[in-house]
Amino acid sequence: MTREPVTIVEIDVDTCSLTFGVGACTAVLGGAVVRKCFDTYATCAKPLAFSKVVKTLRFAESRAGLPMGAPIFPALVSVSSITSTVNISGADDNLSAFGRRATVSVEMADFAYHDRYLDPYQAERISGAAQIDEGGYDPATRGTFFAKLRARWPYYAGRALRVIQAEMVGGALVNSVTRNYIITSFSPPDDQGRVKVEASDILDLASNDRALCPKPGEGYLLAAIDTAATALTLTPTGIGAKYAASGRAVIGSEIVSFTRVGDAVTLTGRALAGSTLASHAAGDTLQPVFYAAGMRFDDLIETLLVDYAGVPAVFVPVATWAAEVTQWMPDVLAQTHICTPTGVAKLIGELAVLGLSIWWDEVAQTIGLKCNRPPFTDPVYDLTEDANLTAIETLDRDDARLTEVLFFTVQKDPTKSATDADNFRRAAYVPDLTAKGALAYGDTRTRKIFCRWLNDGNDSAALVLSSRLLKRFSSAPTQTRLRVDWQDRAIGLTDVLRVSSKTLADATGKPVATLMQVISRSEPEPGHEIELIAQAYQFSARYGAATADTCPVFSSATVTQIATGEFACDDTTLRMSDGSAAYEAI
């Protein structure tokens, strides 16, 4: 049986579960209501009663034998996509914390349409029963599919779009891969009758213009309070329901803790976290504060994405994140107050520069999170010119090299600047003296990190994170463009490669197997080749984690224990008992 490749685009449209004039929908024709709705919020006569359900529209190229079931409109002309690029540890200033976002552009041909699938009152349009401003008309001869859809559904931004690539066998789809996106634009039909829908990956929901943390305060002080006050009342009436029953907030430049019943707020703490005790006037805003009190970074980022950006929890692999952070950052706990509504992407960007890579994996359909650390137990893909490597090109990135890190922690006042050194109590200076030396690079490349997330004074974390950044970036993080055979299509973003090529040689000219980490992946020739861009993975020393008490000595340990554990070396030779290199701490 033949297998034919097929691409299907799905778009989720918000529609209403109610029927015009029935039950909860009390709309009636008359007065300003001259026609029944088109089952969308923009055309709803009783928007407070709108009951959202999702209707999925499916589009494919015009062809015979499309799968049966829900309608598939044969309007698809082309689909072009740009895959995401990972910003390793947030170190590339040319990219956002989420790297370069995956995007897709879908072009479709407009067409005349009878409206039977989209309009529950289509037959009444024809009879005239659905409108009082004119008689009956034939929807198939009035307007076109996409022109009508845009007019009825102007709130497309942020709605789901999926691209399904599969094979069709006997009218059924097999081996399908679904990629999820968020719509960013939807153009009207052009003079050729073509429309273009553009979308970005799921992390678009966290962009600074879409998602804020904390949420803006909507309540105000009904009356002035002085420095001795322990209570206040919010206005307008009923606004207290927009606030938590307890938590922290900021009034002016003073951080307070509170409990709340209705609009009545009891102040349980004043002038917290180094903020200034003050009197406040009637009309001052009670602004909620996002208070992270000893949160692990995986929990923190999940909270920002799911609770504040509205990213569906299904895309956050919490168990995988937890394992990564437990292994590499278990004692790095966030302690801070975010007092001003701030873009979620910006906040996550502040976390990324501490040594976190965060990206959308369009193949696995999950948000990835990985710490700045050695390859450790990651699977390693071997690529060689003799086997699966068809092309290689290397670009030096000396602009991303570091020789020292200046790490500011412990804000004096969280209501003040998060990027002004004068508002921080501590500064950890970690240099790479070898790289700075006159016989090495002979220059200074400084990364200043203003970290409001470690306000508990975790100096050891600042030193460790700075040291890891230097170990990774004290040499120029070269990037290499690779073309590999389709058989290696399992390679994904942030996977580890061991590349052997004559272009990667030692001082004698001998090829050296070089570790790299994939930061971008594309399929210029699906079914034939994949293209990877990989960044040098420069943790070249030997690292391990503390072993269990039951672990034997190095000479009796298993291969796995030696690869993942950390053993003491001979204190004279500074080598292991088999002559291999000693472990280093990280």
Image (spheres, helix red, strand yellow):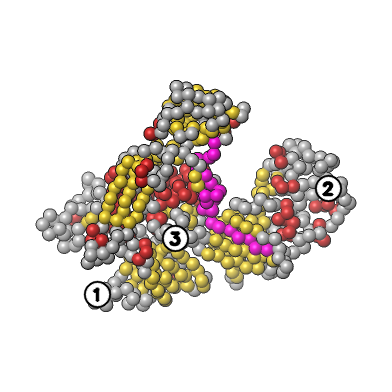
Q: Nearer the viewer, residue 283 or 131?
A: 283
| Residue visible at 20% across and 61% down in the picture | 581
Per the image, is 552 magenta?
no
Q: Residues within 10 Å of mark 1 (few under 14, many from 20)?
A: few
Q: Please tell me which residue is depicted at 65% across the width and 58% down the height of the picture.
A: 186
Q: Are discs 2 and 3 less than 8 Å apart at CB? A: no
Magenta residues span: 195-217
Q: Residue furthest right?
A: 135
Residue 24 is situated, as x and y percent measured from the top left of the image, at 73, 37
Q: Residue at x 25, y 61 (%)?
A: 436
Of tags 3 and 1, which is closer to the observer? 3
Considering depth in this image, is 448 or 35 the residue closer to the camera?
Answer: 448
Residue farthest along the left direction in this orientation: 572
Give residue 244's position: percent from left, percent from top.
Answer: 52, 32
Q: Which mark is residue 585?
A: none
State the residue position of label 3.
Answer: 94
Q: Is residue 565 visible?
A: no
Q: How many angstroms separate mark 2 from mark 3 (CA)? A: 55 Å
Identify which amino acid the numbered label 1 is placed on: Ala
Q: Secondary structure at mark 3?
A: loop
Please state which amino acid type lies under the numbered disc 3: Asn
Residue at image coords 34%, 38%: 456
The residue under label 1 is 507
Disc 2/disc 1 C-alpha distance (Å): 82 Å
The residue wearing badge 2 is 130
How far separated are the C-alphas under marks 3 and 1?
A: 32 Å
In reply to whether residue 203 is colored magenta, the answer given is yes
The local secondary structure at tag 1 comes to loop
First reached walking from the N terminus: tag 3 or tag 1: 3
Q: Position of residue 347 (x, y in %)?
A: 45, 47
Tell me which amino acid carries mark 2: Ala
At label 3, counting other C-alpha atoms closer than 10 Å, the crowd grade (few under 14, some 14-19, many 20 or more) is few
